[in-house]
Image (tube, rainbow, N blue to C red):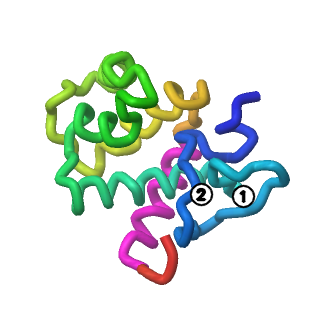
Amino acid sequence: MTRGERNNNPLNIRRVVGTHWRGETERAGEQEFVTFSSVAWGLRAAFQILKTYRDKYKAVCIEDIIRRWAPPSENDTNAYIYHVCKATGFGGKERLTESEWPALVKAMAWVESRMDIADETMKLSFELYSRLKNNKTTK
């Protein structure tokens, strides 16, 4: 079982001091990565991060998103981009709309945690994101 599976965090979102996610839980021994009560909450957090990338950093294509998500100092970023583009069918510099994020996140979950996310889970997580994206009380 991968760390992403154990933590219900398919994209391996790291803990950031002062940031608390909806659906976040504690898991004994896990200090580096966020743990979630379900995969849907972990994916919902990924969508929220993509929104921040778009709004704050103008990252709207796979290349920009992945270079920020998985920087070359820690990852084989070019291989990551290649695999996500191949899985989604999107070009690396193609501008993605919010409605295309589920395909992106599904591909990223495979690269990060080798998790094949069920379509129903992806739909639920995107609905959670859509309902709660403008509620600023917690991420």
Q: x%, y% of residue 58? A: 17, 53
Which residue is at the front of the view, 63 or 68? 68
Q: Is residue 63 above or below residue 33?
A: above
Q: Amino acid at mark 1?
A: Ser
Amino acid type assigned to the residue bearing label 2 in the image = Trp
Look at the picture and state if 9 lies above or below 84.
below
Residue matched to label 2: 41
Residue underneath mark 1: 37
Circle 1 residues within 10 Å: few <14, some 14–19, many ≥20: some
Residue 68 drawn at (x, y percent):
32, 42
Residue 36 lies in what quarter of the image?
A: bottom right
Q: Please tell me which residue is depicted at 28% across the width and 52% down the height of the picture.
A: 98
Q: Position of residue 54 (x, y in %)?
A: 24, 55
Residue interval drawn in magenta: 120-135
Element carrying mark 1: loop
Q: In the drawing, does residue 22 fall left or right of residue 128? A: right
Secondary structure found at label 2:
helix
Residue at 21% across, 47% down: 59
User: Main structural element of the magenta stretch: helix, strand or loop?
Assistant: helix
User: Given contact means CB atoms under 8 Å apart, are the residues at marks 1 and 2 in contact?
Assistant: yes
Relative placement, left or right, of 22 versus 35 is left
Tag of residue 2: none
Q: Is residue 124 magenta?
A: yes
Q: Quadrant of the N terminus?
A: top right
